[in-house]
Image: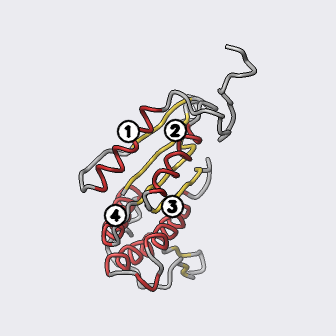
Amino acid sequence: MDPRKNPFAPGAGTKPPALVGRDDQIESFDVLLERLENGYAERSMIITGLRGVGKTVLLDVFRDKAEAREWATVEWEVEKNGPFGAKMAANVRRVLLQIAPKSRWTDRVLRAASILKSFTLTFSTNGAMTAGLDIEALSGVGDSGALPEDLTDLFVAIGEAARDHGVGVVFLIDEGHVPSSGVRRSLLLLG
């Protein structure tokens, strides 16, 4: 192939003139959205590959497709040493506000917000407490300190809140990778 006409454009998030070789993944995403909209369970997707093969561009396509169906979407590039819990909490807050403005929150959205507050409660060394929402925390849910359990509580609550408002939720998480392998992952979590 003539290198001047090759649509392959390696680079971080660089959109090529043509997205080639990703039709199966795009179709799988369309099927996944439709199955979830119809109330069927479906697995999340994980896209893997070396740097520059189009994972981030594919996530952008997924975002556009989800937003066209009026799903709440959050894109997030994971930072190697960043505070995962705090960043997840900020993104969940964004999702709750995408599901509905605070003035239209139903009981399920309020419950999800209360769980989010439980998830985000922190105490400084001087005993001061900070939290990200002006709502009462829900004790005993999302506050165990065990991230996998608390995230499960949070995601279940978000899914119930989204269903209550007739929308879906997509978390597009980029750059989750294993440093020693060189393989990078883009994750897609749906609710």
Residue, far left:
40
Instruction: State the residue position of label 1.
Output: 28
- How far apart in space, not on screen, are marks 4 and 3 (Cα)? 15 Å
Label pair 1/3, CB-CB below 8 angstroms? no
Looking at the rendered structure, the kind of residue marked 1 is Ser
Disc 1/disc 3 C-alpha distance (Å) = 26 Å
Q: CA distance from mark 3 to mark 2?
A: 17 Å
Badge 3 marks a residue whose secondary structure is helix
Element marked by disc 4: helix
Q: Are marks 4 and 1 in contact (CB under 8 Å)?
A: no
Q: Percent from the top left, x then y, of residue 150?
A: 38, 63
Q: Residue at x 49, y 57 (%)?
A: 67
- In the rendering, at what x and y percent does residue 25 appear? 43, 35
Mark 2 nearby-residue class (10 Å; few <14, some 14–19, many ≥20): many
The disc, 1 or 3, on the residue closer to the chain's N-terminal end is 1
Q: Earlier in the sequence, mark 2 or mark 4?
A: 4
The numbered dot on residue 136 is none
Q: Residue at 38% across / 38% down in the picture?
A: 28
Q: Residues within 10 Å of mark 1 (few under 14, many from 20)?
A: few
Quadrant hosting residue 14: top right
Camera-near label (2 vs 1) is 1
On screen, residue 9 above or below 59: above
Where residue 159 is drawn, which disc sits there?
4
Mark 4–mark 3 CB contact (< 8 Å): no
Element type where label 2 sits in the image: strand
Q: Secondary structure at mark 1?
A: helix
Give the residue pinned by disc 3: 88
Tell me the tag on residue 185. 2
What is the three-letter code of the residue carrying label 2?
Answer: Arg
Nearer to the camera, 90 or 40: 40
Pointer 4 or 3: first along the chain = 3
